[in-house]
Image (spheres, rainbow, N blue to C red):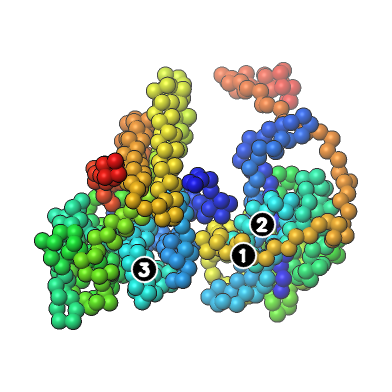
Amino acid sequence: MFDPTYTEEQQALVDTARKFAAETIIPVAGEYDERAEHPQEVFEKAWALGLMNVEVPEAYGGLGLSTLEGCLISEQLAYGCAGIATSIMCNHLGCLPLMIAGTEAQKEKFLGWVTRELVFASYCCSEPEAGSDVAGMRTKLDKDGDGWRLNGQKRWITNGGYANFYTGFATIDPSLRHKGITGFVIERDRPGVSVGKKENKLGQRASNTVDVIFEDVHLTDEDLLGRPGQGFPIAMETFDKSRPMIAACAAGLIGRALDECVQYAKERKTFGVPIASHQAIQFMIAEMAMAYEVTKLLYSKAAWEVDHEVKRTSTSAIAKAMGADLAMKVTTDAVQVFGGYGYTKEYPVEKLMRDAKLLQIYEGTSQIQRMVIAKNILVRG
Amino acid sequence: MKILVTVKRIPDPDESLKFAGNAIDTSSSKWVANAFDEYAVETALRMAEHIGNKDRLAEVIVCSVCPKDKRQHVTQFLAMGADRGVIVDADETAMDSQTVAKLVAEVFRREGCDLLVSGKLSQDSEGNEVAQRAAGLLDLPQASFAATLRWDRGANALTVGREVDDGVETKTIPLPAVVSVDLRIVLPHSVKNGATADDHKYSDGARLASLRGITMAKRKKVDVHTPAALGVTPSSHVAVAGVTAPEKRAAGQIVDSAQTLVNKLITEAKVL
């Protein structure tokens, strides 16, 4: 049965991640956000401490932590900065298709690589005209002698400009829709692979987001993930397994907003008393606490289901949609609690609000999550 | 080289104090590791590690007197990098410093250690006694309140910078020895072990436990002894006469002039 208590060891993992966020992320998060810069120094320290690639199995040099543990760590990193957390978590997203469908040789090569040195893995699924509609992708994989030729453009690729390898999906025939989707894994230095324009984003600005372009990239069968035409279930399973992490990121943002508001509400005075004495503020703070508990429980349950291979449920979609929507509401309220000051960059809450918005969009929008949830209910019913 | 580091669990010093009768009520306290012990373990690890080389120059053993099922702080230090642990299974809260020092000295003797590193005090009782008493019991040279430490391996000696009231006193002591550390020992250049480059910059403060360290900690060896097995009979030379909260500070007064202040200091406070 699902048991929402954490072991001493899990608590120790959380402690390290929390201290890392406090000492290494929070002091620099504002600057990297302002400059929209990839914080290499933070990633170097995170990698050395073991905060990246935590779920890579021990056989490939990883720690083999559970998805729940990965989520507990992600929450703390996102408490520090959701953008930096996204870029740290991105390696997990990039490695998931390998863990789901990689051959032994692919796993040894790529999973072994991320645990041996600091390298970045990016996940290439979305395209300029195919985000939510995964089956509508146009990146094309054509048979070319013994191998394959890859052509197309991927968009919104996290860490794409810094990635050492890419996992992704292309189609062998767009008219086949989801039955044409095929997974692949290739190194960045393969001829024909290039990085396009970098997005200038509203939030999560420390996280690098770019186009990745494939022009006549030669692939062999060894570069494919799973069999041709069988990539769609891999993409869907990847999302199932990565969504709890986004919900954990939401919990981190909500927790941060709550802490910032509690501290500010006790210090800031209006009408001769701290604003924490006003019921209007108290209610917003109470709702933040409610949102935190809900999100934490939901991501824990979704992660637990991933760890226990409970399949065909929509808990991860519920956790992701609920967490993202609550994070947006809570961080908007946080700006309200801070009033005019909250709207300025002098205080940390406007960044939380900007960062939260992305949670409702990436890894399946809040609307796509509702489609998944509804479909699950209606099919089951 | 074997380094024994004393570590202690204490009620979280950030929590507000609760009283029960004539004592501090720790029944609902969260127990955490004493911060000075983190510095002590960091010191020992900096001595033991040869940065840029896989060799370890010393074995780091953490030792705690605590109930054997309340060992989270020991696990925490194993996660941080200590090689193994020794627990003396006892209720340390009922023991005086001399008993704890005897237990530590006995573990030191039996393990055949070369160096005892201890935090200068624990943040709960702030006794600042165990290291000095253990040095006495072991009849070893000691350097307390170390802020810098240099290990001269050729001479088998330590040069210790001690922060004292009128500055920094530097003294060299032969090993085996006892050192208690102060908080500046974890500055980036405080510890030099003669193998790691002298200009190596450590991160400021005690290191965080790495995730690999955390997952490996439970697999490390921890020996459990009883005071009786170590031949130590708990004594209590110190009795607690009473525990009370400090009196609340009375509200201050704001005066409108220096003259009024002086008058009040003369007539009311009677301090001038």
Residue at the spot of label 3:
A119
How packed mark 2 is, by other alpha carbons closer than 10 Å (few <14, some 14-19, many 20 or more), is many
Residue at the spot of label 2:
B74
Residue at the spot of label 1:
B219
- Could you tell me which residue is drawn at 81 percent across and 33 percent down? B242
Q: Amino acid at mark 2?
A: Val
Q: Above or below — where is B205 with respect to B30?
A: below
How packed mark 3 is, by other alpha carbons closer than 10 Å (few <14, some 14-19, many 20 or more), is some
Q: Amino acid at mark 3?
A: Val
Q: Nearer the viewer, residue B227 or A199?
A: B227
- Could you tell me which residue is drawn at 36 percent across and 55 percent down? A241
- Could you tell me which residue is drawn at 78 percent across and 51 percent down? B90
Q: Above or below — where is A175 with respect to A147?
A: above
Q: Secondary structure at mark 3?
A: loop
The x, y position of residue A113, in whole percent, is: 39, 72
- Could you tell me which residue is drawn at 66 percent across and 37 percent down? B28
Q: Above or below — where is A42 with respect to B2?
A: above
